[in-house]
Image: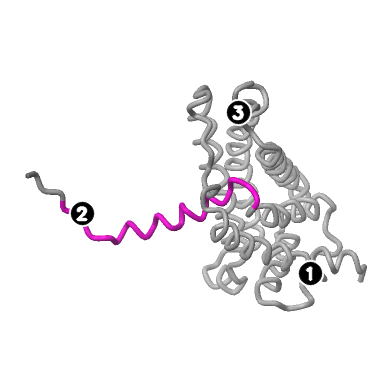
Amino acid sequence: MNTFHHFLFGIYPYICLAIFLFGSLVRFEREQYSWKSDSSQLLYDGQLRLGNICFHVGILAVFGGHLVGLLTPLAFWDAIGISHGAKQIFAMLMGGIFGSLAMFGLVLLIQRRFKVDRISANSTWRDKLLLIWIAITLGLGLCTIFVSMGHTDGHEMVKFMHWAQHIVTFRGEAPDFIEDVNFLFKCHIFMGMTFFAIFPFTRMVHVWSGFGALAYIPRAWQLVRRR
């Protein structure tokens, strides 16, 4: 098997994951004042609400779909009677809808970030790189839908499931499963993995705070009494 392919899809995922986890921890420990989303609403409010809602709803649905679709064991889908072909068609449909929604919102956010002078002047190169990186990753993902239309039996999808599940269970033969898949899929996977590597160095760290907010749900009511 090609050595570069083995590195890219067998070793590189762990490098990205290590940077993602330890980089986030180090930034929280050393640069807590930079741990924020840096909202630009005060600089210019136009298109922010629509862009934010579309992007966040779409991207969260896409991420959740990838997580569940790739990491759920095949035995589970077989046990509940869902064929590989049906699962792939459903994934293509939902991915197309929510991916397009996320892309629409992202285009609005990119337009604000690059075209509005006040926002552009107050943006770092990392802010702009992040938006472009997500846009390319999303675009590649949407393009793979057209490739998948040529084989809706679910056979190709199963390869990605095996790859992802072998990666998270630390089995070295993971790269073998996707060695012969279409180049677009490989590009999409590379961009997605690298996103986790650049995550700790961008405003995306505020996502961790979103998970932390879940701790407030079971918290007891705060009693406030009048004097």
| Type of the residue with mark 1 | Ile
Please, what is the dominant secondary structure of the magenta stretch?
helix
Residue in the picture at 69% in, 52% down: 198
- Pinpoint residue 87: horizontal percent, then vertical percent: 61, 58
Q: Is residue 155 above or below residue 139?
A: below
Region of the chain picked out in magenta, as a range? 201-223
Query: How many angstroms separate mark 3 from mark 1 (CA)?
Result: 36 Å
Q: Is residue 17 left or right of residue 5?
A: left
Q: Is residue 60 left or right of residue 127?
A: left
Q: Quadrant of the C terminus?
A: top left
Q: Earlier in the sequence, mark 2 or mark 3?
A: 3
Residue linked to disc 2 = 222
| Type of the residue with mark 2 | Gln
Residue linked to disc 3 = 108
CB under 8 Å between discs 2 and 3: no
- Pinpoint residue 50: horizontal percent, then vertical percent: 50, 29
Q: Nearer the viewer, mark 1 or mark 2?
A: 2
Query: How many angstroms separate mark 1 from mark 2 (CA)?
Result: 48 Å
Residue linked to disc 1 = 11
Q: Quadrant of the N terminus?
A: bottom right
Graded by Cα atoms within 10 Å as few (under 14), some (14 to 19) or many (20 or more), the crowding at tag 1 reads some
The tag on residue 206 is none
The kind of secondary structure element at disc 2 is loop
Q: Earlier in the sequence, mark 3 or mark 1?
A: 1
| Type of the residue with mark 3 | Leu
Q: Is residue 130 above or below residue 23?
A: above
